[in-house]
Amino acid sequence: MSQVNIPSERVKLLISLIILQLCFAGFHIVSRVALNLGVSKIVYPIYRNIIALLLIGPFAYFMEKKDRTPLTFSLLAEFFLLALVGITANQVYYILGLYYASPTFVSAMQNSVPALTFIMASALRIEEVNVVRMDGLAKILGTLASIGGATVITLYKGNPILHGPNSSGESMQSWTWGCVFTFCHCLSWAAWMVLQAPIVNKYPAKLSLTSFTLFFGLIQFLVIAAFTERDPTHWQIVSGEEIFTILYAGIISSGLVIALQTWCIKKGGPVFVASFQPVQTVLVAGMASILLGDQLYSGGVIGAVFIMIGLYLVLWGKTAEARYDSQDKEETLAKHLLESNNNNQECPTRADIP
């Protein structure tokens, strides 16, 4: 019976991961459609975060009553900073990058986030690098490959692979701005993950932490909107397409995705889930080409290949590091047990004492 259950569980996990990447890919396409429809770059994330907060907040309140630690001013300040980096800056740069570049490009650049996270964590001494072992070398090479790929995409657009409707619609200046904003988005995302690690240790209620982050991010967006979106017409949703894009962003991307990703990580582990990230890029490329008529460029393909190689090298390095650490702990434990047994044998018993 167990032999039947194991493959079925694996199949469930694989199907769930594909659905997860489809949801992520759909968000890139839906967000670009929203921008094409004229939805405000500030109003769109505000509505998205309101829906996400309404979805996650009640679950956090009722499910994590025992997990929440008392709130302090220091914790609230850290939540605010986390929101500034992970919600406000992250989403603003994402929307701007998507507006000036393309969904395929943004998705490809997001594969560099693990490498950027590794650089930041190493600089802050959160991540240790052993350059003598293979895992340390793999992480370093993977980081260099990801940075090299991002550099290729930014500096070399290349020729269109297939001449589509949008092949001549983007100026080089717009493409450069798209590269800059998307890279800032990836930096914000990486910084958010690095900053989140020590905060989770102090405040382990993850859904509540997400709710507080969304709440402060929403306040920050509203402050920005007070200066940039004073025209009431920018807040009006006038078509079914606009309603769909906002509901998708709030319900699917910020609600369903969180639950599904949590389940996948629980069943397969974070490294296995992260290894499916390039699948999203392939899905986005196909969907953007069919639905939006977006163009693939040779520079983007070359850079994406380098970034994906870098992603897998970093992930392999993390897996190997965990294996090395596990072996070291087992060897240390065995050594302590052996020393303990030797000490017990050397100690005289009461019968041995004259």
Image (cartoon, rainbow, N blue to C red):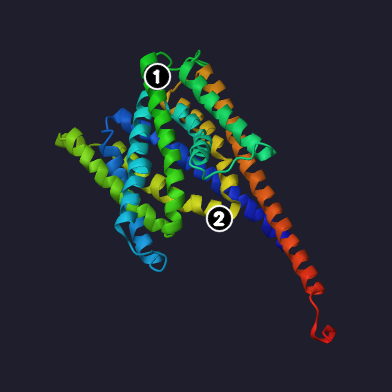
Viewport quadrant of the N terminus? bottom right
Residue 51 position in % (x across, y down): 31, 49
Q: Is residue 340 left or right of residue 71?
A: right
Residue at the image point whose x is 43% and y is 29% from the top: 183
Residue at the image point whose x is 37% and y is 22% from the top: 177
Instruction: Give the residue type that dot 2 points to.
Output: Lys
Instruction: Give the residue type that dot 1 points to.
Output: Thr
Asked if 6 appears above or below 174 in the picture, the reply is below
Based on the displayed image, in which of its 4 quarters is residue 206 positioned? bottom left
Nearest to N terminus: mark 1 or mark 2: 1
Q: Is residue 198 visible?
A: yes
Q: Which residue is mark 2?
A: 266
Q: Which mark is residue 305?
A: none
Based on the displayed image, in which of its 4 quarters is residue 54 positioned? bottom left
Q: Which mark is residue 176?
A: 1
Residue 236 position in % (x across, y down): 20, 38
Number of callouts = 2
From the viewer's side, name the closer residue of 116 and 344.
Answer: 344
Residue 242 position in % (x across, y down): 29, 37
From the viewer's side, name the closer residue of 207 and 7.
Answer: 207
Residue at the image point whose x is 38% and y is 28% from the top: 181
Residue at the image point whose x is 64% and y is 40% from the top: 130
From the viewer's side, name the closer residue of 268 and 142.
Answer: 142
Q: CA distance from mark 1 to mark 2?
A: 39 Å
Viewport quadrant of the C terminus? bottom right
Q: Are marks 1 and 2 in contact (CB under 8 Å)?
A: no
Q: Is residue 240 visible?
A: no
Mark 2 surroundings: few (<14), some (14-19) or many (≥20) residues within 10 A: few
From the viewer's side, name the closer residue of 82 and 304.
Answer: 82
Q: Is residue 123 left or right of residue 246?
A: right
Residue 338 position in % (x across, y down): 78, 65
